[in-house]
Amino acid sequence: MGRDSSVAGGTDGGWLPGERQLSESHTVLWAVVILSSLFDVVTTIVGMERGLGEGNAVARAFIETYGTPGIGLLKFSALLVVVLAWALFDDRRATAVLVGFALVSLVVVALNAMTLASL
């Protein structure tokens, strides 16, 4: 049984998808997504402890509202969206979601690291 290319396609006709097999490429992408997300949170917290401000307005609002745990809450919320998109979309779109999130996260981590290294 192949996976349907529609956005929704549960076996019971509901909006929840059927079981998705984790391909090798998706395993690698998930590892990059999770590790880069972790490094993003850590480098952001270290930067804030060293007196730097948050450049992202949404992240700044979360931090102002919830304190330092706000950055973790925001990242967790973003990862939930990625998990749902990955589970609901066909393989091509699911791969695009993972690649897009991984690339953005890696760029943010690189910029954070360069900023911290320049202090």
Image: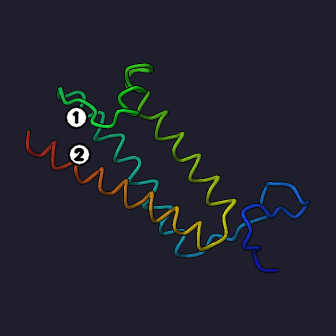
| Viewer-side residue, 19 vs 107 | 107
Question: Residue 110 is drawn in which quadrant?
Answer: bottom left
Q: How busy is the neighbourhood of tag 2: few (under 14 within 10 Å), some, or many (20 plus)? A: many
Callout 1: SS: helix
Q: Check the picture and name the quadrant holding the N terminus.
A: bottom right
Mark 1 vs 2, N-terminal side:
1
Residue 42: percent from left, percent from top: 32, 40
Q: In the visual, does 62 lie left or right of 117?
A: right
Rendered residue at 56%/53% (across/down): 82
Looking at the rendering, in which quadrant would you find the C terminus?
top left
Residue 61 drawn above or below residue 23: above
- SS class, disc 2: helix
Q: Residue at position x 55%, y 76% from top?
A: 24
Give residue 66's position: percent from left, percent from top. 44, 21
* Residue behind mark 1: 47
Which residue occupies 59% across, 74% down?
92
| Residues at marks 1 and 2 touching, judged by CB atoms closer than 8 Å | yes
Pointer 2: what residue? Answer: 112
Q: Is residue 39 above or below residue 119?
A: below
Give the percent coordinates (x, y) of residue 51: 18, 26
Q: Residue at x 42, y 61 (%)?
A: 32
Outermost residue to the right: 12
